[in-house]
Amino acid sequence: MIRPGPRNLITDVPGLRVGNARDDGLKSGATVLLGDMPFTAAVHVMGGAPGTRETDLLAPENTVEQVDALVLSGGSAFGLDAASGVADALRAIGRGFDVGGQRVPIVPGAILFDLLNGGDKGWTQNPYKALGRAALDAAAAEFELGTSGAGTGATTATLKGGLGSASAVLPSGHVVGALVAVNALGSATVGNTAHFWAAPFEIDSEFGGLGPATAFAPTDIPATKLGSHRNTTIAIVATDAVLSKAQAKRFAVAAHDGMARALMPSHTPMDGDLVFAAATGTRPLQDHVADTLMIGHMASICLARAIARGVHAARAAPGDPVPIWSSLAR
């Protein structure tokens, strides 16, 4: 039986830490995944409206093999500056790709749109660079879920979104984890109930233990934030397996199945749905076919669980445009 790691967080993958920073007045924030050492990374985008930084270099055919950190942020295009704050701080401590003695930290990032969530967006100076640096400074094995980091001001069609994470240990000994900021155009719950779409994959009542909805109309038009342009779910899946960039890309592709299982609808033209993959490379593959298949499959399961955990953990704040999950009658 597959079980979560001891924290049920992406940081169960050895050598990874996560830091969050938020501004409650802004109703936004940033989240950083940091490796103790550089790690192999890839990305796969399935939404129609992505916002990204340094994702082209992650293609398997391109030169740079490893990155120093990955950043998820609110703020739409302004939030891309969070990765600049992370890169500056990493350079100051000597991290980065060595180019003739100059260190260039490689920090890909992605953003979600949370500019219409009721927070104060009247800044005179972009706040996201400072949020990125603060998130890096907070990087640790334990971190907060729900209304925190990049999930601070996130919403779904019916409920407040949030930052979620989950992990699993495979029979091969490999560890897989997921980290996600849930800001979907669609919904994480079934109709007007508190039942999560991801319920079939829940472990130990980690997001309420209500089980699957007993009835729903599969042909009904699902609830969406259509017309609001306040969307995008951005995620990272990670493993301790030794993966090439091409294998990491397939890892990211497989993880998107979890997004489709947990959000209805997902991968829409108005979402920038994206998954980064990170492989720390400390545990070799024993069977290249079976191990990569199971690592990808478990990435999708962990991501579905992480999405539900992020919505489940959201906390109410003044000015929220939608309710939190715990306010639903059950």
Image (spheres, rainbow, N blue to C red):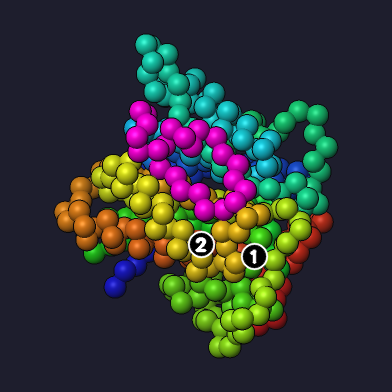
Q: Amino acid at mark 2?
A: Met
Q: Indicate the quadrant where residue 192 lies.
A: bottom right
Q: What label sits on residue 186 in the rendered view?
A: 1
- Give the total of numbered labels: 2
Q: Residues within 10 Å of mark 2 (few under 14, many from 20)?
A: many
Cα distance in 3D space between marks 2 and 1: 11 Å
Query: Which type of secondary structure does the marked residue at label 1 adopt?
Result: loop
| Magenta run includes residue 164 | no
The residue pinned by badge 2 equals: 259
Q: Indicate the quadrant where residue 223 lies.
A: bottom right
Q: Amino acid at mark 1?
A: Gly
What is the span of residues highlighted in magenta in the rendered image?
A: 42-64
| Magenta run includes residue 62 | yes
Q: Where 216 falls versus 221 (above or below)?
A: below
Image position, residue 63 (x, y; %): 35, 28
Asked whether 287 or 208 is in front, the reply is: 287
Q: Where 138 falls versus 182 (above or below)?
A: above
